[in-house]
Image (cartoon, helix red, strand yellow):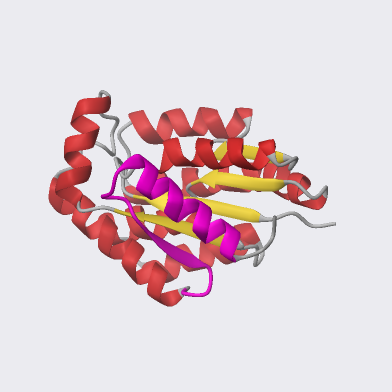
Amino acid sequence: MTGRFVTFEGIDGAGKSSHIETLAEWMRHRGHEVVLTREPGGTPLAERLRELVLNEPMDTLTELLLVFAARRDHLARQILPALARGATVLCDRFTDASFAYQGSGRGFAPERIAALEQWVQEGRQPDLTLWFDLPAAQAAARRAAARAPDRFEQQDEAFFERVGAGYAARAREHAGRFVRIDAAGTPPAVRQQVLAAVQAHGWW
């Protein structure tokens, strides 16, 4: 029995974190086992690595290696066991974020990220990726109203424009699993897009 692996992606402030919780609740009400998790994070070790990545100064290679170290532990201890027992895993970010943030945002060579992806994931990819697409300026306004910024959220608007372009490139490259969500709409409108994208697959 194999479960489904659904990832939520988008720049900081796009609203994906609130909608992933809504989808988890929607699925649980229908009797499905749902594992709600995030990256970096999802296990005790990965959460400790997350704190370093979000708060400690480091160069891009160190950042990328820590993210993938956390990802490997997350896969081994949380994601793969849940999928093996038939659960649905909803994950707030996965490897597409590495290509968008460390790749497009920070300028790290995508072929080196791809090598880590293959080594760490051994070919495992999400079954569905919901990409919350929002202009960088609008996302910045949302972040400013919501919380104190971490090391990533302190980046300027040009950084997030590059990250958004990185997500767009990933969506073109992996069109079979990506669904673009127009995150500029009202929360109910965005929720409807999320539910429609999930229901279109006919898995649940």
Q: Is residue 92 above or below residue 42?
A: below
The answer to whether residue 11 shows anywhere in this view is yes
Residue 193 is left or right of residue 168, and the answer is: right
Task: Identify the residue shown where x is 18% and y is 40%.
Answer: 140
Q: Position of residue 18 (x, y in %)?
A: 43, 35
The answer to whether residue 64 shows anywhere in this view is no
Task: Identify the residue shown where x is 52% and y is 52%.
Answer: 195
Q: Is residue 106 magenta?
A: no
Looking at the image, which is closer to me, 161 or 59? Answer: 161
Q: Is residue 180 magenta?
A: yes
Task: Identify the residue shown where x is 40% and y is 69%.
Answer: 171
Residue 157 is left or right of residue 21, and the answer is: left
Q: Position of residue 170 (x, y in %)?
A: 40, 68
Q: Residue 204: which quarter of the image?
A: bottom right
Residue lying at the far top in this picture: please name it.
Answer: 148
- Looking at the rendered structure, the number of numbered marks drawn on it comes to 0
Task: Identify the residue shown where x is 26% and y is 26%.
Answer: 146
Q: Position of residue 157 (x, y in %)?
A: 14, 48
Q: Is residue 180 above or below residue 77?
A: below
Looking at the image, which is closer to me, 28 or 164? Answer: 28
| On-image quarter of the N terminus | bottom right
Looking at the rendering, the stretch of residues picked out in magenta corresponds to 175-200
